[in-house]
Image (spheres, rainbow, N blue to C red):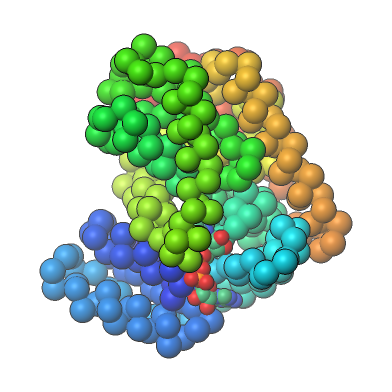
């Protein structure tokens, strides 16, 4: 499998390449960046360690790499200027992102490729990519709350003094202020968190606050997150490469689960060959469900502001894929990758 990383010279892009190198699953990693020297330097540094890791091809390249890539990861993005509003930054990143998508299409982005969107605002850009890239919606995945979920598990583990790998807990909704902690299914190696000694409202409040502010704290301390986001992206790329069907909180076009449509955000999603295989609808608490719906409202508002400025971003007829209408799912059901709703029991059998 070949992975191209657009923005591969930057912090997130290069860390993604390093995580993929250490993973040893994909065979070809191409770093594409507007700053060609930076991409070349990162590729050279990575390549110097190749003898110690795995048999992989690692190199810098230009947009032409996209035509032969199975996965295209977009990490190119701009950082906030002093005194810049959130919306101004969004507008600058949207313009940059749409330009990159058009270049990738012109370079021959294949309909059978996967697009993994990382640049922020990730849920909004993922939605634009679904409209613009000309790929089936199942093949466009935003990183969503993957990183927030990893952080959440890590902070919980620290507080409960258990290994992070044994903490099962999710953050869903927006990768942003309205993200939603899913306490109702949180567990330590299958044991309900709610019954764990020391667990209570104070711990919940503090751990969620730590999770939500982790990104800002890292920006303040070292300029931006790199290691953990690289590993979070690797989990998505490996799920696609290995058809592992992991349930991941990636941001994808919603087709009816949790009552959501026409917006990209994170719900539990089975990721494997073909991209999105199912959206899994769990019985959440009312607060959690309303929280996810609030995320959708916040994101739709931003999408409307963006669309009002750039006009319709839908792909030209021919390659563009409009989301297929899907029936609203019954509660406690899963939505298949084709928008079909399947009963929970059938989904469990199919796993
Ligand atoms: N979704 C998440 O969980 C998550 C987490 C961390 C960072 N991010 C986002 O990832 C993005 C990148 O962050 P970073 O810290 O790596 O920034 P960075 O500045 O280190 O890297 C961005 C890179 O993009 C390159 N670039 C800019 N325009 C380009 C273009 N047109 N074509 C190719 N390359 C181009 C730049 O040269 C730079 O090397 C930001 O939008 C950031 O907000 C997302």
Q: Residue at x 52, y 37 (%)?
A: 209
Q: Relative to the observer, which residue lies in front, 269 or 189?
A: 189
Does residue 59 appear left or right of residue 311 in this picture? left
Q: Residue at the location (70% across, 64% down)?
A: 89
* 268 relative to 211, above or below: above
Q: Position of residue 182 (x, y in %)?
A: 51, 26
Q: Is residue 112 above or below residue 345?
A: below
Q: Position of residue 348 (x, y in %)?
A: 40, 19
Q: Considering depth in this image, is 275 or 100 the residue closer to the camera?
A: 100
- Quadrant of the image occupied by residue 57: bottom left
Q: Residue 287, position in %: x, y?
A: 63, 20
Q: Could one spot residue 102 in this view of the protein?
A: no
Quadrant of res 345: top left
Q: As drawn, which residue projects farthest toward the bottom?
A: 37
Relative depth, front residue between 125 and 333: 125
State the image coordinates of residue 164 (x, y, percent, origin top left). 29, 36
Q: Residue furthest left?
A: 52
Quadrant into which the N terminus falls:
bottom left
Q: Residue at x 40, y 42 (%)?
A: 150
Q: Is residue 37 above or below residue 249?
A: below
The image quarter in which residue 13 lies: bottom left
**Quadrant (top left/top right/bottom left/bottom right) for the C terminus:** top left
Q: Is residue 95 visible?
A: yes
Residue at x 38% of width, y 37% of height: 155
């Amino acid at each position: 499998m070949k992975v191209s990383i657009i923005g591969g010279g930057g912090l997130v892009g290069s860390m993604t390449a390093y995580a993929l190198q250490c993973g040893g699953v994909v065979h070809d990693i191409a770093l594409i960046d507007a700053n060609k020297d930076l991409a070349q330097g990162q590729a050279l540094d990575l390549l110097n360690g190749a003898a110690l890791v795995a048999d992989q091809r690692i190199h810098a390249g230009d947009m032409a790499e996209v035509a032969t890539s199975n996965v295209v990861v977009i990490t190119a993005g701009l950082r906030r200027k002093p005194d810049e509003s959130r919306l101004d930054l969004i507008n600058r990143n949207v313009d940059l992102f749409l330009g990159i998508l058009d270049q990738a299409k012109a370079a021959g982005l294949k309909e059978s490729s996967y697009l993994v969107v990382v640049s922020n605002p990730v849920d909004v850009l993922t939605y634009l990519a679904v409209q613009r890239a000309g790929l089936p919606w199942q093949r466009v995945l935003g990183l969503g709350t993957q990183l927030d979920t990893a952080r959440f598990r890590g902070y919980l583990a620290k507080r409960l003094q258990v290994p992070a790998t044994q903490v099962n807990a999710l953050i869903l909704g927006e990768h942003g202020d309205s993200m939603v902690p899913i306490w109702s299914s949180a567990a330590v190696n299958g044991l309900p968190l709610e019954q764990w000694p020391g667990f209570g409202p104070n711990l919940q409040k503090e751990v969620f606050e730590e999770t939500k502010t982790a990104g800002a704290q890292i920006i303040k301390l070292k300029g931006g997150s790199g290691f953990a986001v690289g590993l979070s992206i690797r989990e998505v790329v490996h799920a696609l490469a290995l058809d592992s069907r992991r349930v991941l909180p990636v941001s994808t076009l919603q087709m009816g689960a949790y009552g959501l449509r026409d917006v990209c955000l994170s719900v539990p999603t089975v990721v494997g060959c073909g991209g999105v295989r199912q959206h899994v609808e769990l019985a959440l608490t009312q607060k959690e469900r309303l929280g996810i719906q609030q995320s959708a409202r916040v994101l739709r508002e931003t999408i409307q502001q963006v669309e009002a400025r750039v006009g319709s971003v839908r792909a030209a007829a021919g390659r563009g894929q409009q989301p297929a209408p899907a029936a609203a799912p019954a509660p406690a059901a899963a939505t298949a990758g084709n928008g079909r709703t399947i009963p929970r029991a059938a989904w469990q059998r199919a796993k």
